[in-house]
Image (tube, rainbow, N blue to C red):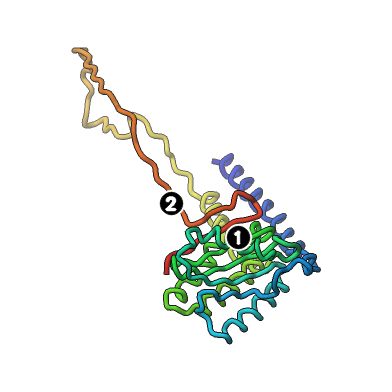
């Protein structure tokens, strides 16, 4: 029991030490911007960042989103594009967002560079989030949750609010303080929980756990007179098992065959 307590103490101490480098890295290495300057000004096809081709936004809503998208792009160092479309010829919303982004030479630090494109596909009734360049690494795991956060607004026809939520969630995702805050909340709880379990194990009263054949035998009540086994025969059976089966897959995320591009399709609205 003593060796067990020592082992558990060592494990707990090691786990505690492993968390220290992670905290130091988070607090001392805030997210660096992609670039302080834009190198593609002469190649940009247009300064426009909101494309309401489905005509589901008012003029004032377009202007408000245009302003917010550009301000956020500068703050977080990535290009942000908002698109609406209502076209029966859009067979693949993912391919459409990628082609749209590359055709317009979007990208923060360079053409076809870092950025995110959010699209509301009115014909297929799905939202799409595509990330490019370094944004594919920093936002790749958040695309689905960002689209999910906007689902209620999309379902109720509040398309401006849906885009607004996407922009807010993008800002939160790229905020280094957000990740640190989650760590600082979860870590103490985890350590306290592990500490309580460890203390319970360390101060657990010693209990004799030896179990053998005599544990459940009342010597005053039963006497074993004779033990005998008689072999009669052996029966063997066999059957043929046929191989077969089926597999299936489903998903909402798609990739562009490159680590510099990724895309997620949200739920239908």
Placement of the N terminus among the 4 image quadrants: top right
Q: In the rendered view, does 77 fall on the left or right side of 120?
A: right
Residue occupying image coordinates x 64% and y 58%: 136
Which residue of the protein is positioned furthest toward the left in this rendering?
A: 232
In this view of the protein, which residue sits in the foreground, 188 or 204?
188
The location of residue 172, given as percent across then percent down, is 62, 70
In this view of the protein, which residue sits in the foreground, 22 or 86?
86
- The residue that disc 1 covers is 99
Q: In the rendered view, does 267 fall on the left or right side of 178?
A: left
Placement of the C terminus among the 4 image quadrants: bottom left
Residue occupying image coordinates x 48% and y 57%: 252
- Cα distance in 3D space between marks 1 and 2: 24 Å
Residue occupying image coordinates x 53% and y 54%: 254
Q: Quadrant of residue 99?
A: bottom right
**Numbered mark located on residue 250 in the image:** 2
In this view of the protein, which residue sits in the foreground, 60 or 207?
60
Earlier in the chain: of badge 1 and badge 2, it is 1
| Mark toward the viewer: 1 or 2 | 1
Which residue of the protein is positioned furthest toward the front in this rendering?
A: 89
The vertical placement of 76 against 22, above or below, is below
The location of residue 10, given as percent across then percent down, is 64, 46
The vertical placement of 223 against 59, above or below, is above
The kind of secondary structure element at disc 2 is loop
Q: Quadrant of residue 137?
A: bottom right
The location of residue 39, given as percent across then percent down, is 80, 65
């Amino acid at each position: 029991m003593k060796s067990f307590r020592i082992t558990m103490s060592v494990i707990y101490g090691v786990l505690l030490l492993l968390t220290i480098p992670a905290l130091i890295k988070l607090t001392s290495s805030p997210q660096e911007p992609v670039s302080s300057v834009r190198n593609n000004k002469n190649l940009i096809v247009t300064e426009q960042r909101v494309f309401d081709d489905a005509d589901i936004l008012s003029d004032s809503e377009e202007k408000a989103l245009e302003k917010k998208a550009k301000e956020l792009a500068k703050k977080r160092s990535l290009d942000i594009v908002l698109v609406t479309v209502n076209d029966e010829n859009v067979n693949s919303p993912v391919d459409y967002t990628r082609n749209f982004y590359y055709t317009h030479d979007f990208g923060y630090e360079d053409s076809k560079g870092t950025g995110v494109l959010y699209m509301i596909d009115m014909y297929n009734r799905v939202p799409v989030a595509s990330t490019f360049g370094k944004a594919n690494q920093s936002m790749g795991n958040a695309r689905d949750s960002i689209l999910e956060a906007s689902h209620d607004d999309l379902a109720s026809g509040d398309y401006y609010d849906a885009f607004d939520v996407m922009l807010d969630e993008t800002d939160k995702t790229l905020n280094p303080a957000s990740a640190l805050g989650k760590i600082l909340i979860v870590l103490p709880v985890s350590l306290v929980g592990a500490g309580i379990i460890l203390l319970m194990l360390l101060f657990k009263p010693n209990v004799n756990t030896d179990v053998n054949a005599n544990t459940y035998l009342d010597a005053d009540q039963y006497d074993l007179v004779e033990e005998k086994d008689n072999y009669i025969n052996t029966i063997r059976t066999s059957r043929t098992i046929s191989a077969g089966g089926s597999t299936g897959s489903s998903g909402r995320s798609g990739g562009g065959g490159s680590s510099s591009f990724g895309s997620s399709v949200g739920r239908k609205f």
